[in-house]
Image (spheres, rainbow, N blue to C red):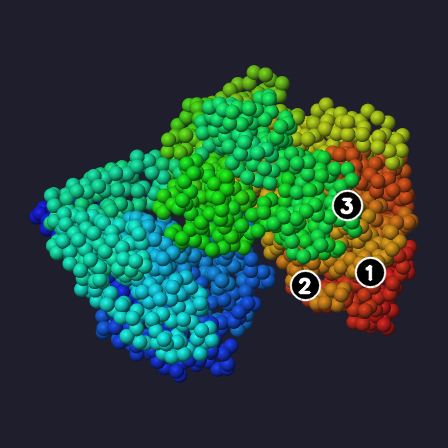
Amino acid sequence: MPRTARIAAGVLGSALVLTACTTPDRPPGDGSWSDEPTDAQLAALAQAGFDDAAEHAEQFYFVMTDRFADGDPSNNTGGLEGDAPAHGYDPTKRMFYQGGDLAGVEQRLDYIEGLGTTAIWLTPVVVNQPVQVTDNWTGAGYHGYWGTDFTAVDPHLGDDAELQSLIGAAHDRGIEVYLDIVVNHTADAVEYAEGSNAYVEKADSPYADADGRPFEDADYAESDEFPAVTADSSAYTPVLEDDEAELKSPAWLNDPTMYHNRGDSTYTGESSTYGDFSGLDDLWTERPEVVDGWIDVYSDWIAESGVDGFRLDTVKHVNLEFWPQFLTGIREAADAKGIDFFAFGEVYSGDPNLASSYVRQGGLDAVLDFGFHGAAGGFATGAAGAEGLSQLYASDALFTSDGTDALAMPTFVSNHDIGRVGRTIVESTDEATWTDRAILAQQLMFLTRGQPVVYYGDEQGFTGSGGDDYSRQTMFASQVEEYLDDELIGTDATHAVDNFDTGHPIYQAIAELSQLREAHPALASGVQVTRAAENGVFAFSRIASGAGTEYLVAVSNSTEAQTVALETYSDTFTPVYGDGSIEAADGAAQITVPPLSAVVFKADSTIDTGDAPSVSLTVEAESATTAYVSAGVSGDPLARVAFAASVDGGDWVYAGTSPGPDHRIAYDLAGLAGGASVEFKAVILDREGRTASAEAATTVATPEQAGGSLSWANVHYDGDPAQWGLYAWGDIAEESQTTWPESNAFAGEDSYGSFAPLKLAEDAGSVGYLVIDGAGNKDYASDRTFDPSATPEIWLSAGSGDVAHSLAEANGYVTVHAPEDGTDWGLHLWGDALADGVATEWDAPRPPDGTDDWGRYWHVPVDDVGADLGMIVHSGDTKLYGSDIVLRPSALGETWVTAAGAHASQAAADGKAVIHYQRPDGDLDGWTLHTWEGAADPTDWNAGIEPARIDSFGAVYEVDLAEGAEALSYILHRGDEKDLPADQRLDFAEYGQEVWVTAATDGYVRPAGASTGRSQDLDLAAEQAIWLDADTVAMNVEATDGRIFELLSSADGSIAAADGALTGNFDTLPLTAAGGLTEAQRRAWPQYWDYRAFKVDADGDAIREALRGQLVAVERDHTGTPWYATAVQTAGAIDAVYDDALNADLGVNWKGKKPTLSLWAPSAQSVSLELFDSPEDTEPSVHEMDFSERTGVWSVKGAKGWDRKYYRFAVEVWHPASQAVESYSVTDPYSLSLAADSTHSQIVDLDAADLRPDGWKQEEAPAEVDPTAAQVWELHVRDFSIADESMDEEVRGTYAAFTQEDSTSVRHLAELAEAGLTHVHLLPTFDIASIPETNQATADCDLDLMAANSTEQQACIGAVRSEDAFNWGYDPLHFNTPEGSYATEADGAQRILEYREMVQAMHELGLRVVNDVVYNHTAASGTADKSVLDRIVPGYYHRLDANGDVQTSTCCANTATERPMFDKFIVESTELWQDAYHVDGFRFDLMGHHPKSNLLAVQAALDDDLLLYGEGWNFGEVANDALFEQATQVNMAGTGIGTFNDRMRDAVRGGGPFDEDPTTQGFGSGAWTDDNDGQATDEELAALMHAQDLTKLGLVGNLADYAFTASDGTATTGAELDYNGTGAGYTAQPGEAVNYVDAHDNEILFDALAYKLDEVTGTERAQMQVLSMAAAVLSQGTGFSTAGSELLRSKSLDRDSYDSGDWFNVIRWNCEGTAGFGPTSNGFGAGLPPQWTSEAKWPYAEDAIASVPQPTCADIELANQRYLELLQISASTSAFNLGDAATVGERVSFPLSGTEAEAPGVITMRIDLDGLDDAFDAVTVVFNAGPEAVTQTVADAAGSGSALHPVLQDSADPAMAEAGFDDTTGTFTVPGRTVAVFTS
């Protein structure tokens, strides 16, 4: 059938009589008019139906090519070699190729044409997978639906030339050819690496882009863009066998990422479009590449073959958005060929609402009429009457759309999937009637509206024994055993012979029907009017709109003659078909129809056109989802009505023409906002060209969303429900109110007895009740009440006052069911819920208490229904269900156990859904259940599920469920009468699998209180809306259609929610739904990937104004009622609106002697400057500040006299934390100087002479140090000197201490520098929130006298820890100002001078300075006193979660380092510390919480010689690049920025920092070689050898690509070596590894070894300390150690000493004890570590303190001197800083690794220096962590003349004298617990 919408306007106009001033017109190219279309324009579109030629209907003959005729036996194997499993041809097997081909079809065109065929539909002709093998079957692709090459004809069927020949020959006969095409899937080539194919929901495993970030693919289904994806992007990892890597064509089909890759479809829910169809590879049709690819493929078929149309396979299994795009593309190709193309699709559903959506919204010309199939099959067999047909056609109006209507639908009674109508006939009817019934089915199809499809073989009486392969018999002689057993109707022939009998009665009947349709076109394309449906007779009129001649048709499935009376348009008729009779006059007729036959009568005259037409248009005032528009007409009954629609006064669109006489259309409201006005115009056109028009409008309504309060309560009763009822009062709805003594019936049935549902009033809180009989006698005398909001179900015991609140409480037991399968099941029981004596032993399970129809059951007595009950159903050691079952009796009083688990209902155990349906009127006749999603066998609309039984409640429907079903979609209906207008969906997870419903009522009667409705959610404190950019707000809402979205803005912050409404003073900014986020938005805001986007309909001024007040995003229904309201996160909008701020100068800036003060506060309503003469000044001068609308910056120009004055900003701003407009005085986040305790900012000029030390401007840092040569000493400013008795007391613990050259601490620092230390890393020195700068508290205890293992010390310190002078300092308050507590004067600028003097002093020692910076969090947020940034720009500087709460994964208030203005702040802050304070590097705290781009921006802004490194940990809300590409270990590879190497740390120390047991040993702590539990196991040996490998990798800078032999002998690389399940190696260059074995975090090294080393001397402990430190010092990366570790410093086992006071933290310079710091030599034994960090480790700490002696001064000095030796060795050669990865890979080796000579606990590393400018040719390092001396023979070292490094030849450790080298053999000897370095 041509597409009438595409007929040229000129043709339309020629058939229409119009006045000279009117011109017929189509809508413009986009299908719309800018102005309301004229009557003439719409009439021109209606005119198309009056042209009979334009409405020619096809008669299809559906051919499965392989099964029709074998015209060329030479192609039967498709040219493939081998046997049937290879080429697929085996004529003895039904699932293999049989030999039919295109040549055979062409040769049989006479036969096909003889049926009257006008169009041939061929199954897919593309190249198919010859054979597919599964676990269950093996079959061939004979049918065409397993495509591999979509560009060529399958060689089994012929070739391209033979297809062209067939099409040409058919066209010569006037027969069109349609190709069946597939876009949903290809052949099964993709496998899943995971080895599973169970469907995985997107909710459980979203798609991820190439960066691993989730995205919603459906958001791109109509877009030209799509995220980049990889093989890891889907739920499963797709893989292809080598021989299938290029199986498919075009080539893009071989890309496995072009497929959904989610597992096999369950044909329910999401899986219906995303799952693999029967295992076939399901294409990712949401991808534009797939859409465009298919358009190209099938456009080529049109262009090259001239095919006339397509049948589209599996349409509903492809996303709806695909079809309009695809069809537009192929129609362009058809238009280019001049083909009036027709595309119809397979929507396998009898539900007209679903099927029609693919016409109206999907753009298909038509869909196969599965509804007709269901109704016709039932009619032909007599299983159903005529009523189903009447109901079917009543839905025809749903299919009216632009250019098409229900007349275009192909109809069928048999097909290749469902099977043949003949099978149904032979299986269910009398053989004597078979032929008549088979012909009746064809008559019904040919004479009713639509385009009939004859399935090949039906005309020969084929039947088959099932669907699919069983219904695909060959027309030529068959050898298939199953086919040879088939019955054939109307013939004695069998399938053993050819069946092309043109004399077959069914063939003849079809040919006759075809001739009848050709002679009487109204029977083919005329409108249809139902006249009667009774007594097995379906009678109707067919009328050609143009000719106006009425035909009366009647078909009967009665076995007796039937007479029906009916109305007609005409008065007299003449028979034209069949043997019936008619009596007609005056618009009435009586037709007699013979048994099992059809009759046709033609009116003797045309229908009169009548008076001038009139039309009235009606539509509901409010329409949700779909507007149903009806035109009432008068005049010509054959008039046609054209419809157009306009939304809110916008463009008009053509909505289709109704052929009549039922003039209705369905207009989809998808995408329209609630409250939108949709105007409709209808123009009626009669056969005389007369017109009339009418208009009507509807308001888009919100789909029903019922209130969320409980709807029902249920009262259970164990008495006689026939005698007793429930009388109730109180908060009940009118439906449950009765007049005494009438009552509510106990109608529901359950295992307790019965129950009475009570419909509740809104917000019900109290229901009173009595159980009474019909005379008002009471079962229990007293009135009783219950609160349904607390207990919506109660259980009553007959004759008593007992009320229970659970089934288990009522019964006193839990019922457990198990199936009766012949196994002697028993029940093992445990748990606190059980009654005394009920628990069992495994060997003595509880026997069953009885059996019932389901199986055996137990009544398990319980006492405490709120406690847990555990159970296992078992027989011996065989468990029915493999895992423990634990339930709470109060929640589940009865359970059914199967091998799949424990189920809450028998329905769930049986794999069913059970729906109980009550109709108050008791009329259940005809009500059936239509099912789709979740059903094992979805129903046709006209063949729904009948009730399994009727009980006292009502009808009970049982539905077998598909495997894995999570919900059941259903409609209860009687014909087209639905119980509820909307589709219903039972979510099993929420409501279970058995529910009770009552007629025409949303929600469920039971489960009690269950509601499918929605309650209001008006939470203005939560910020769940995200303003992404200048004009987009994102919200996590499920639906937008029919809803109104707004942005409310209130300058005074008065918006509030009260009584379900929003109140206050506010402006409204409309929001327009815009689908999903754009790709750019998703990449910027990946955490909101599944949110919906809304455009803000406002100009820039309105948006800026809105950003300065309270913001609330609202969802309203069409009546204005708010259903959802939330506050709004605004950071993204602020960035977009004020992006010029990135170029602004902020803080204090000087022009000459005058400062300008600038504050970025774009959301503030006002800002002024408060200027103070001193911090004590209480009357500041106030200065107004100017605001820039471009930058959001407030600024004021100052005077010369402002220098050194103090200031604050008075800010007025809405703050979401307090839900108020706040007015407060805040310091400057860009502060350069501060008053003590940071109360005020201070105006300073950092270039002022008095703030510069002498020589500052000329001061230079020591020479640049490559990161691989850097040796870093991590130091806390206060720790360094607070216990140095040699230092002036007033400077102890300050910056100034570093300038006291003669002090012990500074001399030690100088000694380290001279030995080779290059950098001092200072723990945070910015302004710290957690250290008071005045009035510092001290511990009021005599700590010196307390025992070594006492808890008193930590208790004493803990009492003052928040007020004392100590904290690590990771609590930033002001980032750009030195901490005041470390200055000798905290007030003002002295801190600046002293800081600079400190840096200068270290530079003079030859040391560079690294600043530890903390930009990842602040000490506070919200309106707290120590919240600086967040009080100025609320919600901007901190990272918020989806509710607007500040994230705290860092410990504190996480900053939003990804925000542009904070990125700017960080970059400028580091520049300031570099330029103003001459620091030489930065250590970034929790660097993984920064974007990589931020660190790269810092790097680019700073001088090249700065050392940059940080904590690249991957955790928290940013983990795995969730929000941005993080600055993590792996991601920073190749940047030159270092990260801490936790791999080496854990390998050397042993265990991990978060282990519960701190005694786990590592390479440097005696693992296996000096086992601390006395049992060195094989497992521990393996762990040691792996630790050795990790240590080796650390020694080469943790390079990802470093290749070496692991200790187990396998070749590996750094990236392949395992570290806690991930690759150990991650750096690209060695300088990117910061190698360390201790730091301020976790136990310091001495304390870690105290836990791990057992029974060693103090000297040995010192040796192991040095050996561990050597791993870092002698590595290729940056060496890093904690200050004092070289002195065996201890923190008395404190693992997190951030707030543990000086007592636990100081460096004790005097090994004989320090006044005020106790007698301990190094800090060990200073008491148990603090309870607030280490209490869980106290048992271990007590053991360690008791067993580990304090080190002696000699031990400490040994460690110190040996560390100095290590530094000297490292500095003496380039061996340990080779510089780049390639050189390391070439020159560093571990020659014994993985060989038999490798000793546990020993690493031998050899470094080749030959050819380098170095003092040595080679360096060999032997780490011997074991207690005994070892020898290591390295063959390549023989003859090298190696000797101990010169530094070690007079080592501080006497044991080193035992080290040596045998030059003859290349054998190194190294004493135990020693690292020795040899050179040659």
Name the residue: 84% across, 40% down: 1739
Residue 1510 in the image: above or below residue 9: above
Find residue 1344 and report its horizontal and vertical position in percent: 88, 31
Which residue is denoted by mark 1 in the rendering?
1578
- Which label is found at residue 1588? none
Which residue type does callout 3 highlight? Thr
Tell me what residue is drawn at x 22 percent, y 59 percent: 580
Q: Gap in Å between the C-alphas at discs 3 and 1?
A: 40 Å
| Residue 840 circle label | 3
In the figure, residue 1122 lies in which quadrant?
A: top left
Residue 1671 percent across, percent down from the top left: 77, 55
Mark 3 or mark 1, earlier in chain: 3
Q: Nearer the viewer, residue 707 or 1491?
A: 707
Position in image of residue 1115 (x %, y %) = 43, 34
Q: Is residue 446 visible?
A: yes
Q: Residues within 10 Å of mark 1 (few under 14, many from 20)?
A: few
Q: Secondary structure at mark 3?
A: loop
Residue extending farthest bottom: 74
Q: Who comes first in sequence, dot 1 or dot 2?
A: 1
Q: Position of residue 18 (x, y in %)?
A: 10, 49
The quadrant of the image that shows the C terminus is bottom right
Give the SS element for disc 1.
helix
Q: In this figure, which residue is indicated by the disc labeled 2?
A: 1613
Inter-mark Cα distance, 3 to 2: 55 Å
Give the number of the mark in front: 3 or 1: 3
The CA span between labels 1 and 2 is: 25 Å
